[in-house]
Amino acid sequence: MSVAAVSLVVGLAGVGCASAPPEIELRERAALCLHRGMRFPGNPAVRAQSMEAAAEVLDGDAAGLIAEGLRDEHAGVRFAACMALGRIQDHGSTDAIRNLVGDPDASVRVAAFYALERLGEFSYRQAWADALQNAPDAGVRRNAAMTLGLLGNPKVAPLLKRSVAEDNDDGVRLQAVEALALLGDPDAQARFVRDAFGGIGYRQPFALLALGRVRDEESISVLQTRMVNAPYLEAKLAAARGLAMHGRLDGFDLAMQSLTWAAPDASLPDDPPENQIMRVRSMAAMTLGDMRDRRALPALYRCMEMSDDPRIQVAAARSILRLLGPAEPRAPASAAPGSTPHQSGAAPM
């Protein structure tokens, strides 16, 4: 463990505390973890993840730090910053976001279109649609489908259906199907029910998480079945998180146990053990946050303080703040530019 890692553990929590500190202190520590994550120099994925989390649980309190990401050298961070600022509708960042409609990275441009539309500017829809239909990079088309779906506007359904029917990339089609499912399209929702049982690779957990956002009784029944019978832990946790999105605690025990999971398959050639552990523990933490059950606070606190992977720390901090709910108005904790979550050899984004 690096010196930076030791400093974060001691500075935030002391060493090895069994129970969470008082609520005010716990909130400040979790917020500080996200603040530091947004300036973390070792891995752009941590900066992006922290901005996404901050937009969800810190709202406008973190707008200034998120806006720093608009100038980040890494396109993935600029993308995340645009998405986060659009989510919280930070009008103070409008000019800076508008500058990114000419960003050299096409996905960043798409995120800027999304943010600006959330801020009341609707003049980029044609360029957005063109990115969905004609961008040579499938990743850009996936992001265009995802961001269009997030608008919640049924008028984009014909564009998304065209991508489902015509795009030659499976990831683009899948992202468009998810967007349609969130818009209430019954065919798209039925597709995810099928994938929840027969999806291969990433398709099954993707489908289970999508069903968490689909508000009907069939989705709950499917998620309950897959949480018990899915063939591997990540799919079971995806089902548990989907159920949590429906306000259910069915997977509470599974998520609590998975916070300390340490049984990766070392034989997988393209999936390092540390990444397997990161995914499982992060999913467990996110699931507990979505359940809104404060019994999880001590375990999430330990996860945030004792993990040697900043991605897990950020997931735990996000969930702590979800469980604590909105704070009374007060000055937010600030992070010095050199303050960072501890480094751990996390894979680059």
Image (cartoon, helix red, strand yellow):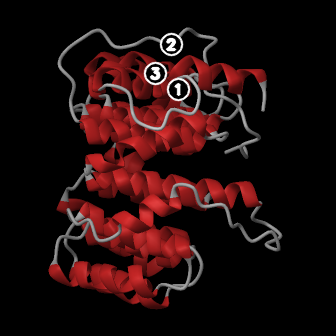
- Residue pictured at 17% horizontal, 19% vertical: 328
On the image, numbered disc 3 is attached to which residue?
A: 32
On the image, numbered disc 2 is attached to which residue?
A: 335
Q: Is 189 rendered above or below residue 152?
A: below
- Residue pictured at 32% horizontal, 79% vertical: 223
Circle count? 3
Check contact, mark 3 vs mark 2: CB within 8 A.
Answer: yes
Quadrant containing the N terminus in the rendered view: top right
| Mark 3 vs mark 1, CA separation in Å | 10 Å
Residue type at tag 1: Met
Q: Nearer the viewer, residue 109 or 89?
A: 89
Residue 153 x/y as whole percent: 19, 56
Q: Nearer the viewer, residue 132 or 343?
A: 343
Residue type at tag 3: Leu
Q: Secondary structure at mark 1?
A: loop
Nearer to us of marks 2 and 1 is 2
